[in-house]
Image: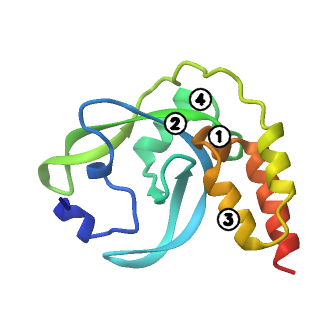
Amino acid sequence: MTHWKKLIDPELLGSYEIPSDKDSIVTIRSAQKETIKTKGGSGSKFIIRFAEINKPWICNVKNGKSISNALKENQVENWIGKQIQLYVTTEECFGEKDVEVIRVRQFAPAPLIPLDPTDAISKIGMCKTMDELKLVFTRLTRPEQGNVDVIKAKDELKIILTK
């Protein structure tokens, strides 16, 4: 079944894609200004991308402050690789009541067992083509895909393979 909101801005992360009955712990893969198309046109927005979710999320001021508080860090470059908890709630937005929105808990989730990225980086390093790299990366676990060192190895090899 398709939620009707998936047909409005299917390229962007929306509240309908986060479970409404529990928090979702996600790993920040990138946090930067990007030009992105929305139903209102295109423009420069503060976009956060997560290792566990393939869609970009437009981060507003309220969520930016919550992330900063949760991570005790104001510099977005230092958010990369860190985890936050997303949840869905309803608020009044743009004059409408009971609008479902994604919010960020004011605290960081409990730390996970540290991941040793050595094996994943080794697998990436053996790739000889972009197709191999794509296949290997998609077969990694979500925590491996979200690991900063693994992302760096993938991005560096991607530059070499596209020359």
Q: Residue at x 61, y 56 (%)?
A: 138
Please report contact status of discs 4 and 1: CB closer than 8 Å, yes or no: yes
Task: Residue 82: give x, y in percent of width and height.
Answer: 63, 35
Marked residue nearer the N-terminal end (3 or 4): 4
| Mark 3 residue element | helix
* Residue 18 in the figure: left or right of residue 58: left
Q: Nearer the viewer, mark 2 or mark 3?
A: 3
Marked residue nearer the N-terminal end (1 or 2): 2
| Residue 126 in sight | yes
Marked residue nearer the N-terminal end (3 or 1): 1
The residue under label 3 is 134
Amino acid beneath label 3: Lys
Q: For the residues marked 4 and 1, what is the alpha-carbon distance in whole angstroms? A: 7 Å
Q: Residue at x 47, y 75 (%)?
A: 43
Please report contact status of discs 1 and 2: CB closer than 8 Å, yes or no: yes
| Mark 1 residue element | helix
Q: Quadrant of residue 135?
A: bottom right
Badge 1 crowding class, 10 Å Cα cut-off, few under 14, some 14 to 19, many 20 or more, is many
Q: Which mark is residue 71?
A: 4
Q: Nearer the viewer, mark 3 or mark 4?
A: 3
Q: Residue at x 73, y 51 (%)?
A: 151
Amino acid beneath label 2: Ile
Q: Can you say whether 139 is above or below 27 in the image? A: below
Q: Which mark is residue 118?
A: none
The residue under label 1 is 79
Q: Which mark is residue 67?
A: 2
Amino acid beneath label 1: Trp
